[in-house]
């Protein structure tokens, strides 16, 4: 199997960025205000980002991803953010879910979920914020109680990017409500 040296990887990333910049200028920027004012999810743009492979950007190649490093991914996010910051949230939350699976999932979970996340057949989102806690994540009230074969979740989450359009959420919960400091009881 042939490998690409660092210069080759940089050339590939530069080519992707050139394509991305042209697309952002022609298909994103002209529609940002309209979509923002309508509070409309950018389905066509998200589908194009899927075709570009952006939902697979940081997922390892062994699972069907592009295996890009952080510096390459930052360049992609910067380009998208210059055009429309809200669009970065769609892909970033997805890739955070993929990273959680990669780091903390079992081998079986990685084999099952990462290829589907890389293909964007699963679209990830993060269920963190709650109505009475805002962004104070240590104050979350949602709990997960272990039962036979899994957990029962009780609580309310809000402001979840990809919640309506996605189908795979990482949910922040309290699994030990008496833990000190409070973050130790979170999963």
Image: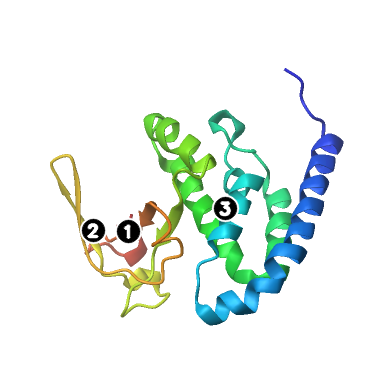
**Residue pictured at 79% horizontal, 29% vertical:** 4
Please name which of the two marks, 1 or 3, marks the residue nearer to the observer: 3
Q: Quadrant of residue 173?
A: bottom left
- Label placed on residue 186: 1
- How many neighbours does mark 1 have within 10 angstroms: few (below 14), some (14-19), or many (20 or more)? some
Q: Answer whether residue 181 is visible to the viewer in this image.
A: no
- Which residue is at the far top? 1
Q: In what element is the residue under mark 3?
A: helix
- Label placed on residue 19: none
Q: In what element is the residue under mark 1?
A: loop
Name the spot of residue 58 as percent of width and height, x first.
61, 44
Mark found first going from the N terminus, 1 or 2 = 2
Mark 1–mark 3 distance (CA, rounded to whole Å): 34 Å
**Residue pictured at 34% horizontal, 77% vertical:** 133
Q: Is residue 7 above or below residue 52?
A: above
123 or 37, nearer to the observer: 37
Q: Is residue 178 above or below residue 55?
A: below
Q: Is residue 58 left or right of residue 182?
A: right
**Residue pictured at 30% horizontal, 64% vertical:** 180
- How many neighbours does mark 3 have within 10 angstroms: few (below 14), some (14-19), or many (20 or more)? few
Please name which of the two marks, 3 or 2, marks the residue nearer to the observer: 3
Q: Answer whether residue 52 is visible to the viewer in this image.
A: yes
Mark 3–mark 2 distance (CA, rounded to whole Å): 39 Å
Report which residue position mark 3 lands on: 47
Mark found first going from the N terminus, 1 or 3 = 3
Mark 1–mark 2 distance (CA, rounded to whole Å): 7 Å
Q: Is residue 79 above or below residue 99?
A: below
Name the spot of residue 178 as percent of width and height, x first.
22, 64
Report which residue position mark 2 lands on: 176
């Amino acid at each position: 199997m042939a490998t690409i040296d660092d210069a080759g990887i940089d050339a590939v990333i530069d080519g992707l960025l050139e394509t991305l910049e042209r697309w952002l200028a022609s298909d994103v920027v002209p529609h940002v205000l309209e979509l923002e004012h309508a509070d409309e999810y950018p389905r066509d743009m998200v589908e194009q980002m899927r075709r570009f492979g952006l939902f697979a950007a940081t997922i390892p190649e062994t699972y069907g991803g592009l295996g890009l490093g952080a510096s390459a991914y930052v360049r992609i996010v910067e380009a998208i953010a210059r055009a429309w910051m809200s669009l970065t949230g769609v892909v970033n939350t997805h890739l955070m879910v993929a990273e959680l699976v990669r780091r903390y999932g079992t081998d079986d979970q990685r084999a099952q979920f990462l290829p589907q996340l890389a293909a964007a057949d699963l679209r990830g989102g993060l269920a963190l914020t709650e109505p009475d806690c805002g962004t104070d994540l240590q104050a979350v009230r949602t709990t997960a109680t272990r039962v036979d074969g899994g957990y029962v979740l009780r609580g309310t989450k809000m402001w979840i990017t990809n919640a309506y359009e996605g189908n795979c959420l990482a949910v922040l919960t309290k699994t030990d409500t008496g833990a000190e400091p409070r973050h130790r009881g979170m999963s």
